[in-house]
């Protein structure tokens, strides 16, 4: 198949939001837009290397991940940080102020946990849990085996659960119980 500018335009329409939301977890709102654009510019330049073995979304997320890593290196960050603007809850007439406060608290707990995790665990949790990608898709993006993704995801959930218990005073809190995205696929 011949890939061209129109193909990348179609991919931007179909997957632009996914790439943008993925990048939000690494660089924040201000830089996510620029890096999303950079991701698609790189995709256009390297379109001849795309192999239709996987989905375009996975290929684009691989490019986005490398772009975020390059960005972090250029800006000399030791760790990726979960941006504040990603975790703010938008007020709605459908929920009460108490629900808004609870969601904000949960978002801050999630931010705190993700910021303390190693980049390897954070990447797996973001891709598998928040982006809801399969183990195979996550493995392709991270350059490892699906089994390695499953093991790392399981270990990351255990670490996150321990962190959550320490942050909440060790009660019955559980990442697996409280995180709708923690289910294994």
Image: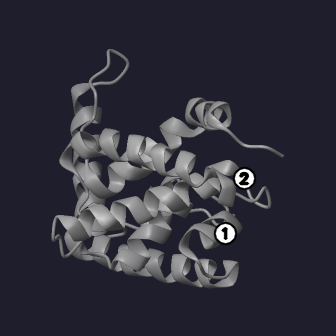
Q: With 146 as the anchor, is 182 left or right in this view? A: left
Point 60% across, 78% down: residue: 149
Tags 1 and 2 touching, CB below 8 Å: no
Image height of 36 relative to 167, above or below: above
Image height of 130 relative to 37, above or below: below
Q: Which quadrant of the view contains residue 169?
A: bottom left
Q: Residues within 10 Å of mark 2 (few under 14, many from 20)?
A: few
Coordinates of residue 28 in the picture (x, y in percent): 25, 48
Image height of 76 relative to 8, above or below: below
Q: With 151 as the anchor, is 126 left or right in this view? A: left
User: Nearer the observer, disc 1 or disc 2?
Assistant: 2
Residue 152 visible? The answer is: yes
Coordinates of residue 38 in the picture (x, y in percent): 39, 46
Q: Nearer the viewer, residue 76 or 18?
A: 76
Disc sitting over residue 135 in the figure: 1
Residue 170 visible? The answer is: no
Point 38% across, 51% down: residue: 23
Dot 2 lies on which element? loop
Q: Residues within 10 Å of mark 1 (few under 14, many from 20)?
A: many
Coordinates of residue 110 in the picture (x, y in percent): 30, 59
| Residue extending farthest top | 93
Specify which label sits upstream in the sequence, 1 or 2.
Answer: 2
Disc sitting over residue 55 in the figure: 2
Q: Nearer the viewer, residue 152 or 141?
A: 141
Q: Nearer the viewer, residue 140 or 96?
A: 140
Point 60% across, 62% down: residue: 183
Image height of 96 relative to 111, above or below: above
């Amino acid at each position: 198949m011949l890939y061209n500018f129109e193909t990348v335009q179609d991919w931007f329409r179909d997957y632009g939001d996914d790439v943008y939301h993925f990048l939000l977890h690494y660089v924040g709102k201000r830089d996510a837009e620029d890096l999303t654009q950079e991701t698609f510019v790189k995709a256009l330049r390297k379109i001849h290397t795309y192999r239709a073995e996987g989905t375009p979304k996975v290929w684009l997320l691989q490019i986005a991940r490398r772009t975020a890593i390059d960005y972090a290196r250029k800006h000399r960050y030791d760790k990726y940080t979960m941006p504040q603007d990603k975790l703010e809850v938008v007020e709605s007439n459908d929920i009460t102020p108490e629900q808004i406060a609870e969601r904000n608290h949960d978002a801050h707990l999630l931010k705190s946990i993700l910021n303390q995790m190693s980049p390897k665990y954070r990447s797996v949790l973001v891709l598998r849990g928040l982006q809801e990608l399969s183990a195979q898709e996550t493995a392709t993006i991270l350059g490892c085996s699906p089994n390695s993704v499953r093991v790392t995801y399981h270990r990351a959930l255990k670490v996150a659960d321990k962190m959550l218990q320490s942050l909440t005073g060790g009660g019955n809190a559980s990442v697996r119980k409280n995180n709708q995205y923690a289910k294994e696929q």
